[in-house]
Image: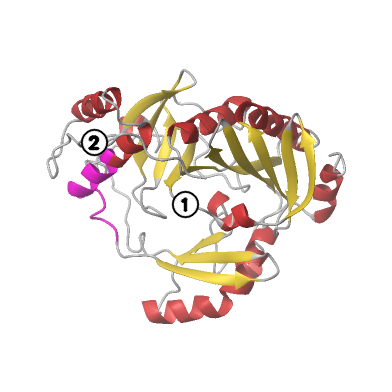
């Protein structure tokens, strides 16, 4: 499914030497002009950022666990996130929005550099997240300060990004608090090279064709759909389905989504239905107090280590409970069955 990478170009950013943002941008733009694709350009930014110590603040390596699940017909995953342990946000004057480009070079982000580019004539910039979930974890942000939104354009831009970066996965949280949202005040999505999440291997239960798009309901701990077809038709179908889902409760219903590019102008999109009234139950809050986002709803839970436990003890603890914990947390952060059933009944399944 992955296309071959484009022609290789030399990374002209000097390793180990911190450069002004303007020089980073002009160098990467020249490389793109000279034949590097967007994926390679972002890879060059990652390689150089690592060389100047962008990740020096990380407290430790995350622990990654996998659980074979016959019920969901795929391996569920869990990572114990050590990266933020002991992290103290920098003090001093900081921009009001943590994702705006004006953060470049501010206290605590002295090594932050970005790459600016266009998607469908809308200006974006990409930066490496300081706390990566997987290698090469980028955040792709609108240059203009706009609130998080799930629109036709949001689907289009994610689709165009993965077309330009074959083999990458675009992952979007939602536009509502307590429904998988992260930074609501600035529109963005996350991007990962060579990442495949468990939901992408989930079994299709019912399938129909909408607007020439193969649309499947999935066997998954939360209400989810898989759309496959020509990119433009997938985008249009996704937007129509989301409008239909949101309409009865527009301030409470939303979705998370994953977008991947398929050769020959096609795309595969996973939509996870969300509802802001349904969140982690009190019994699990001691384990997971933060909101549950797209990566987790797609089958990879992200948890802080248990206090007063060694890494080995944490591994043993989460190994013992992870197989049951993952689908429970996904289910608790999902719309109740009667809402999902009512929505699915409006779709004409074959």
Q: Distance between the residues labelled 2 and 1?
A: 29 Å
Magenta-span inclusion, residue 50: yes
Which residue is disc 2 drawn over? Answer: 105
The spot of residue 198 in percent (x, y) is 58, 58
76 vs 36, left or right, is: right
Name the N-terminal-most of marks 2 and 1: 2
Say if residue 323 shows up in the picture: yes
State the mark number for residue 182: none
Secondary structure state at the residue bearing disc 2: loop
Q: Nearer the viewer, residue 335 or 164?
A: 164
Asked which quadrant contains residue 133, the reply is: bottom left
Secondary structure state at the residue bearing disc 1: loop
Asked which quadrant contains residue 181, the reply is: top right
Part of the protein shown in magenta: 44-58
36 vs 162, left or right, is: left
Which residue is disc 1 drawn over? Answer: 195
Residue 130 vertical placement versus 28 (above, below): below
Residue pictured at 43% horizontal, 70% vertical: 305
Dot 1 surroundings within 10 Å: few (below 14), some, or many (20 or more)? some
How has the structure been colored for display?
secondary structure
């Amino acid at each position: 499914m992955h296309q071959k990478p484009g022609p290789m170009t030399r990374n002209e950013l000097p390793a180990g030497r911190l450069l002004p943002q303007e020089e980073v941008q002009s160098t990467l733009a020249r490389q793109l002009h000279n034949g590097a694709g967007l994926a390679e350009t972002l890879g060059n930014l990652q390689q150089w950022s690592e060389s100047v110590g962008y990740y020096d603040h990380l407290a430790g390596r995350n622990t990654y666990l996998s659980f074979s699940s016959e019920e969901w017909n795929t391996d569920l995953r869990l990572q114990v996130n050590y990266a933020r342990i002991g992290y103290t946000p920098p003090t001093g004057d900081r921009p009001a929005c943590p994702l705006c480009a004006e953060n470049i070079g501010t206290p605590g982000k002295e090594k932050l550099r970005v790459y600016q580019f266009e998607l469908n004539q809308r200006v974006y910039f990409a930066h490496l997240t300081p706390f990566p979930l997987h290698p090469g974890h980028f955040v792709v942000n609108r240059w203009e300060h706009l609130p998080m939104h799930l629109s036709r354009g949001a689907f289009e831009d994610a689709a165009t990004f993965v077309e330009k970066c074959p083999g990458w996965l675009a992952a979007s949280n939602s536009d509502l608090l307590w429904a998988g949202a992260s930074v609501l005040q600035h529109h963005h999505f996350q991007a990962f090279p060579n990442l495949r999440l468990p939901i992408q291997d989930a079994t299709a239960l019912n399938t129909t064709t909408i607007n020439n798009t193969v649309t499947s309901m999935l066997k998954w701990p939360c209400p989810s759909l898989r759309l496959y077809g020509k990119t433009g038709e997938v985008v249009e179908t996704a937007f129509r389905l989301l409008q239909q889902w949101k309409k009865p409760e527009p301030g409470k219903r939303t979705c998370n989504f994953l977008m991947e590019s398929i050769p020959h102008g096609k795309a595969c999109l996973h939509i996870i239905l969300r509802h802001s009234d349904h969140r982690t139950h009190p019994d699990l809050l001691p384990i997971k107090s933060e909101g549950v986002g797209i990566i987790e709803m797609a089958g990879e839970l992200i948890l802080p280590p248990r206090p007063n436990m060694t890494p080995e003890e944490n591994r043993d603890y989460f190994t013992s409970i992870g197989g049951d914990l993952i689908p429970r947390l996904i289910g608790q952060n999902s719309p109740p069955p009667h809402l999902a059933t009512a929505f699915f009944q409006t779709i004409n399944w074959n």
